[in-house]
Image (tube, coloured by chain):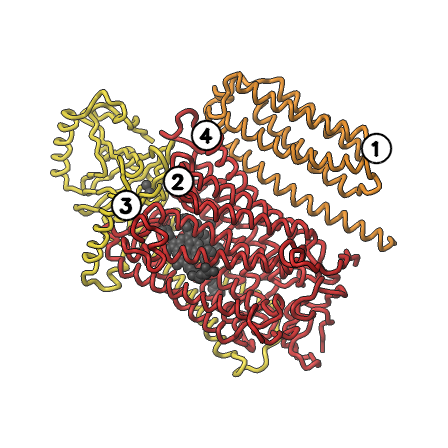
Amino acid sequence: MMTKAEQQTELKSFQNSVAMTVTLISFGMMFAAMFLGYFLVRFNSPTWPPVEIENMPKFLPLFSTIVMALSSLTYYMMENKPQQRKAYIALTLVLGLIFLGSQWSLWSALAESGILISNGNVPSMVYAFTWIHAGHIVIALGLVFWIGDFVFRRPEALTVGKLVNVGKFWHFLGVIWLLMYLMLFVL
Amino acid sequence: MAFLEQHIHDAPTSFWSKYIFSFDHKVIGKQFLWFGIFWLGVGGLMAMMIRWTLAYPGVPFPLIGGLMFPHSGGVVPPDTYAMLFTMHGTIMIFFAITPILIGAFGNFCIPLMIGARDMIFPTLNMLSFWFSMLSGLVLLFSLTLPMGAAAGGWTSYPTLSTNIGQPGAGQTMWLVSLFLFGVSSTMGAVNYITTVITLRAPGMDYFKMPLTIWGIWLTAILNAIFVPVLGAGLLLLTFDRVFGTTFFLAGAAATSGKGDPVLFQHVFWIFGHPEVYILILPAWGITSDLLAFFSRKPAFGYKMTALSLTAITVLSTVVYGHHMYTTQMSPLLTQSFMTLTMLISIPSAIFFANWLGTLWKGSIRFHSPMLFSLGVVFVFGLGGLTGLYLASTSIDLYLHDTYFVVGHFHYTMAASVLLGGFAGTYFWMPKMFGRMMDERLAKIHFWATFIPLNGVFTGMMVLGYAGMHRRLYNPFIYEFLQKLMPINKFVTYCAIAMGVAQLFFLWNFFKTIFGKNIPQASANPWEVGTLEWTIPSPAPHYNFDEIPHVKCGPHEMGNPNLKTGRDYQYQTEELVKS
Amino acid sequence: MDISIPHRLIGLVAQGSELVVKASEQMSLWERMQPPVDISTSGHLIHWLFNYTTYVNLFWFALVCIGLFGFSFLYWEKRHKKALYTHGNEKKHLMITAFIGLGVFLSVDLVITKVTTRDMKEVFWNFPVNDPELVKVQVLGQQWAWNFRYAGVDGEFNTADDVVQLNKLVVPVNKKVMIQMTAKDVIHAFYIPNARIKADAIPGRFSKLWFDTTKTGNYEIACAEMCGNHHYLMKAQLTVLNQEDFDRWVKESQQIAIATNDTENMDLRWGWKWESR
Ligand code: HEA
Ligand code: HEA
Ligand code: CUA
Ligand SMILES: [Cu+2]
């Protein structure tokens, strides 16, 4: 039999996870809508990849993907290895920033290889999708930074709920990126 | 059963923390109510101008026309007309109906009716309101732009809504405004869903919730799932306008790349059809409850009603294609959308039958909330049944984008949802502000609204069947429409009457809230048993100092075994059996 | 086409008010409520379905009214002091509601779904592509006018000798007419009220529809999709001629086309190869 206090924390984390799930569903639907657009375009286009995006940079997106995966991993480690929290959160932050950097150079690389945003709806997608995703990454980094602030300055106030929920968002964005990478650059 | 205690903080004292940046769900609810009523006024005024133009083409709009359209000598110019119906649709749906039905009643009723002290995330709640406010301001500001606000219809299909059709900044502002609004709705939805799942008082299991809560909860779920879809569409369209992407550009407009305008229609209606149920589900819930309360007997087939509302919610996600028949989707798609659309009428008819069952052998009290609820039954019957014509692909070949459609959706939204909103306002007024609204004025308001309302919207149906299409500045340049002039005039007269009738409401509303020596309402003026009536009026800070324990359903009335002298029992009381 | 708003507006205002006079000649309400005369061979299908739906809907709505007003009258508090205590969840209650639900579905939905599907398959989607006498027209919607294109003497579309018309569609009576359309700038909708038919003209896509007229005369073609401030002005004329007149008209206009078409100006070549689907 739990004490009342335990019960309360129990319930609190439960409702937080409910809320987070709903939130992720919402975000998910937004990306899903864009992906739907992608599939409609893709199945109506005679050739794939269409001429507009034939010579797309191959390396940078791959690099971004790896970085993203690593950052998810480090966040995961941070959740489960309380003693090395500081190190791991720092790593996560750095990796996140590297990801943004690599996206940035991706956009300039695209421009150089003559793939402009106005070249048709496939290039439009490449830009729009990566932009929107990057935008979310910025927000998420803010949250990770917030967690970091807890870790470094007031660990006692850092609840599991905060940790897990920010984590969920971060991993979610990782998955979204993976999908985008596969759809736009690989398949 | 373990239950999460919300701690009681002491009431805010300063004006700002009390009325403006309040965390209290009741205050936020009221804020949404004011917000909604204001926009209802604006949208209504626009409707009046639309109607005037249709009945008196080229005749200056009375009174304010001269001020508003000096260049055309008070006559509504064509470009302004387009702007008017676009803004009218946008405002009525997103800034009048949504705030009142979902924002106001959602916030006010959920915690009170499920026995919670507040929403689960008060801060998010406050943010949600201020995001709506922000988006409202953006829209309002866009009206003052030199090139005018958005004028591509509330559906703002590309390529009309891209730079080739709408060069001005208005359309972009419209997109931004709706995006902000979407953020607000999603925040609200997360809050509502979580609150209902986690904060129900002990014993308040799902099938003991009032149907109002069912309606609002399902609405919130639809919101959480589909508003982001609209968000995506808005983002991409904004990119097309601002950054030169070409998602929706095609034809001569697509100088460089090529996109597909129909893509937007898919995205829009994937959201758009659920949206219409988002609007009406709360109204259905409120009506179902009020019919039971004022017939003094339990809601007929409560469980069936709740389940059919759920069924409609599920079905509403897969019928959106019925708005796009004339874009000539593949026959297979078209047919499946038609069939699925038709299926919706089964659950609809079921809860409809339950509504009538609730009235059957009741002991009906015709207070103003009841009158409005009965009104909903009548007009939704018409609105719903007319949906069936449109659902048929071949009939829609003729009726699509005619006033028949306009009539249909005004019967469902401008009639059913509007009356439902009024019913709720009259019903919860005492709990919101601690005062009863003037019953006599309320009844006048009902009849003065209800009778012309049917004139307006049946009139629209007739016009549509006679072939008059939508969004026409001057229908009478078409010879086959000239004979409709008198009918258009009739519709306009009814519309003006309906508009004026709303002044009774406004007067009553303001008088009740700000008037001197208005009698205080008792704790339970309507004699019903749901939780919000177990506490004094107006609802005190943090609602329940003692979290109630729920023991019976929401409409336990007319139970012959009751010995208490009341004909109803509170949800906190054990169900009396013989 | 250029439209300077003030002029257009003044023109319309004049038009509008003078039309009011014209429109107010004697006519019963019932006549006013009727759709424009049906000149198509397919319109009656839509009307049959519409009327059927109306009758059945009226039946159900009558039931609703009986319940609504009847119960309100019978069970008014003053007349009926004590409400019957029932949750309406007994077997017989469920049966009744389920019965009504099914009733509505079977009587309205099932029937109109079936009939609609039949009509669409047999008529509206059944394009007369290999009818030898098929009259082929290409349509281009633009802000705010309809362009019509007939194959010229060579029988080929999008060649220099095509017959191109602005806001004027001419067809022979009792012949199947097939229209392939698209739009130049924004989405329009090609709407012939008298033929009870409508289809969107969408930039970058081809949509098609067909109809078969039964009456000669002049009728109106409208644009049904919001396409900008002057959407309401986007009106064209449909002229249905008997065969001889039509043939004569074709000859003449083909001559005119050959004489006057500017073969250099590629902007006039907005047409496309006829899609024989
Ligand atoms: C609250 C809003 C609302 C609601 C509830 C509905 C409900 C329905 N709507 Fe409506 N609709 C709109 C709002 C709404 N609609 C809007 C805004 C548009 C136009 C948008 C635009 O283009 O601008 C639209 C357009 C629209 C179209 C597209 C028309 C066109 O553009 O060509 C179609 C087509 O299928 C349609 C169908 C339906 C159907 C089948 C229902 C069904 O849900 C109806 C189900 C109900 C019933 C079938 C009646 C219940 C049964 C009875 C009353 C009998 C019971 C009898 C007894 C008990 C005795 N609607
Ligand atoms: C819930 C939504 C809603 C509501 C309530 C209404 C209410 C009304 N609407 Fe609206 N309408 C739409 C949603 C709604 N409409 C939509 C979505 C469209 C499609 C837009 C598009 O095509 O893109 C549309 C389009 C539309 C058209 C077609 C325009 C066109 O296609 O050319 C017409 C024409 O008659 C019309 C008329 C009316 C009338 C007479 C009312 C009456 O019910 C209004 C009655 C008046 C009030 C309810 C308030 C009155 C209050 C006052 C006057 C007091 C003033 C108070 C203050 C200033 C504080 N509407
Ligand atoms: Cu073209 Cu409306
Ligand atoms: Cu719909």
Residue wearing tag 2: B327
CA separation, marks 4 and 1? 47 Å
Residue wearing tag 3: C192
Instruction: Please count the marks in the image.
Output: 4
- Indicate the quadrant containing the N terminus of chain B: top left, top right, bottom left or bottom right: bottom right
Q: Are marks 3 and 1 on the same chain?
A: no
Q: Position of residue B436 (x, y in %)?
A: 58, 72
What kind of residue is marked 2?
A: Thr
CA separation, marks 2 and 1? 57 Å
Give me the residue at 69% from left, 66% from top: B540
Q: Residues within 10 Å of mark 1 (few under 14, many from 20)?
A: few
Give me the residue at 59% from left, 57% from top: B216
**Is residue C103 at least partly visible in the picture?**
no
CA separation, marks 3 and 4? 32 Å
Looking at the image, is mark 3 or mark 4 nearer the viewer? 4
Judged left or right of residue A147, residue C177 is: left
Colour for chain B in the figure: red
Please tell me whether mark 2 sits on a helix, a strand or a loop.
helix
The disc at residue A179 is none
Colour for chain A in the figure: orange
Q: Do labels 3 and 2 share a chain?
A: no
* Residue A185 location, quadrant: top right
Residue wearing tag 4: B246
Q: Dot 4 falls on which chain?
A: B
Colour for chain C in the figure: yellow
Q: Dot 1 falls on which chain?
A: A
Asked if the residues shown at circle 4 and circle 1 are in contact, with their CB atoms under 8 angstroms apart, the answer is no
What kind of residue is marked 4?
A: Thr
* Residue B486 location, quadrant: bottom left
Q: Residues within 10 Å of mark 4 (few under 14, many from 20)?
A: many
What kind of residue is marked 3?
A: Ile
CA separation, marks 3 and 2? 16 Å
